[in-house]
């Protein structure tokens, strides 16, 4: 009887190699990919999801894409096992993913789960004790196979039952990917985009943006976290924020994602970034947003300036004085 593995496939090198090793042993594989607002390589036509889909197509295996939802944001806000150097709840994140994968096993008919994890590659979630903890708390004891580092762990059910050949599983450990590169050459695995994806929650410069959303939200919304990748963010009210584009790409994205009720603001008398006032449309906060916007134009200091304000299909012209100092503007910036 042919056995089936459900593979957590990011599209990076390690998970790609894990899938290839299973396929070479005659195991049927279905891929599972998770998207996150905190992935460093997420894009419309590129990124982790697209790379995972590409790898699945090259291997001719089915793939399901799952989106981390509000429940995941709650994991980030209050992780049971704590944070890494930033707001990265790596152990809790792995448990979250594997619990979701465990639930999907029955639906897709898989017998066990594989990942591309390598012992010692990541300091928080890929220590031996952490990996065993993750396995237990996800309910996958004996059913979670890590082909690249399997020799460092007790045999799993697939190994004990002879579904996979333990002798062909590997003993890779540590942060160097030299062995993975050599294995990729040996297995003729090409066009992998990067050794592994990244998480913005580990970037200390990004942490204040995330924490600000947690601190100023009555209810969590995935959109608020997706917006954190675009432009400069300023807290101008308890429930109001203005986002100002850094470049044309930011301006275009902000225009695309702007929702009904949100004000779009631009300086009328010269080149101007686009500003979007998000959250409560408080008049005082909006006036502050106009002043902050002007600091990113070439408007003369102290001048009264015309601002085009668009909201709900209506366009008006308002005036604002360019009076805010650089220091004052900096006091409102989140990151």
Image: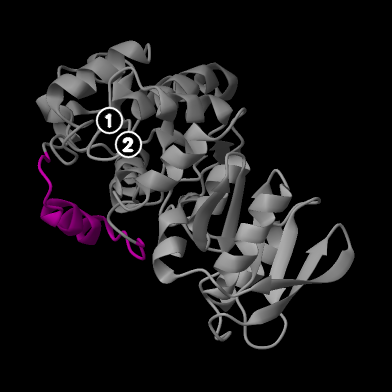
Q: Nearer the viewer, residue 121 or 206?
A: 206
Quarter of the N terminus within the rendering: top left
Label 2 environment density (alpha carbons within 10 Å; few <14, some 14–19, many ≥20): many
The total number of labels drawn is: 2
Residue beneath the point at 27% across and 55% down: 195
Residue beneath the point at 19% across and 34% down: 169
Residue 22: image tag: none
Residue ID for mark 2: 88
Query: Residue 54 vs residue 20: left or right?
Result: right
**In the image as oriented, which residue stretches furthest toward the right?**
314
Q: Which residues are magenta?
A: 172-193
Q: Nearer the viewer, residue 253 or 208?
A: 208
Q: Are marks 2 and 1 in contact (CB under 8 Å)?
A: yes
Residue ID for mark 1: 83
Q: For residue 26: magenta?
A: no
Query: Residue 203 vs residue 241: left or right?
Result: left
Q: Nearer the viewer, residue 21 or 319?
A: 319
């Amino acid at each position: 009887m042919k056995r089936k593995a459900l593979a957590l496939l990011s599209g990076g090198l390690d998970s790609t190699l894990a899938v290839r090793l299973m396929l070479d042993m005659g195991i049927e594989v279905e891929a599972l990919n998770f998207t996150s607002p905190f992935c460093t390589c997420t894009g419309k036509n590129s990124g982790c999801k697209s790379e995972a889909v590409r790898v699945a197509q090259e291997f001719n295996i089915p793939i399901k894409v799952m989106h981390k939802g509000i429940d995941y944001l709650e994991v980030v806000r209050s992780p049971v096992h704590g944070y890494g150097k930033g707001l990265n709840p790596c152990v809790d994140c792995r448990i979250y993913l594997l619990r979701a994968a465990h639930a999907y096993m029955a639906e897709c008919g898989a017998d066990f789960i594989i990942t591309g994890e390598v012992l010692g590659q990541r300091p928080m979630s890929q220590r031996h004790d952490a990996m065993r903890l993750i396995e237990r708390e996800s309910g996958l004891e004996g059913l979670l196979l890590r082909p690249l580092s399997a020799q460092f762990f007790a045999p799993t059910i697939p190994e004990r039952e002879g579904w996979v050949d333990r002798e062909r599983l590997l003993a890779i450990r540590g942060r160097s990917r030299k062995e993975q590169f050599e294995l990729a050459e040996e297995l003729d695995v090409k066009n992998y985009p990067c050794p592994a994806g990244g998480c913005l929650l580990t970037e200390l410069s990004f942490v204040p943006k995330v924490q600000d959303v947690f601190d100023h939200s009555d209810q969590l919304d995935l959109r608020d976290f997706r917006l954190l990748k675009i432009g400069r963010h300023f807290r101008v009210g308890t429930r109001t924020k203005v986002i100002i584009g850094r470049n044309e790409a930011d301006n275009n994205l902000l225009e695309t994602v702007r929702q009904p009720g949100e004000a779009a603001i631009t300086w009328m008398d010269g080149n101007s970034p686009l500003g979007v006032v998000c959250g409560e449309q408080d008049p005082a906060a909006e006036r502050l947003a106009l002043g902050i916007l002007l600091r990113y134009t070439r408007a003369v200091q102290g001048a009264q300036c015309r601002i085009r304000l668009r909201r709900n299909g209506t366009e008006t012209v308002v005036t604002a004085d360019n009076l805010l100092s650089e220091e004052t503007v900096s006091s409102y910036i989140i990151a």
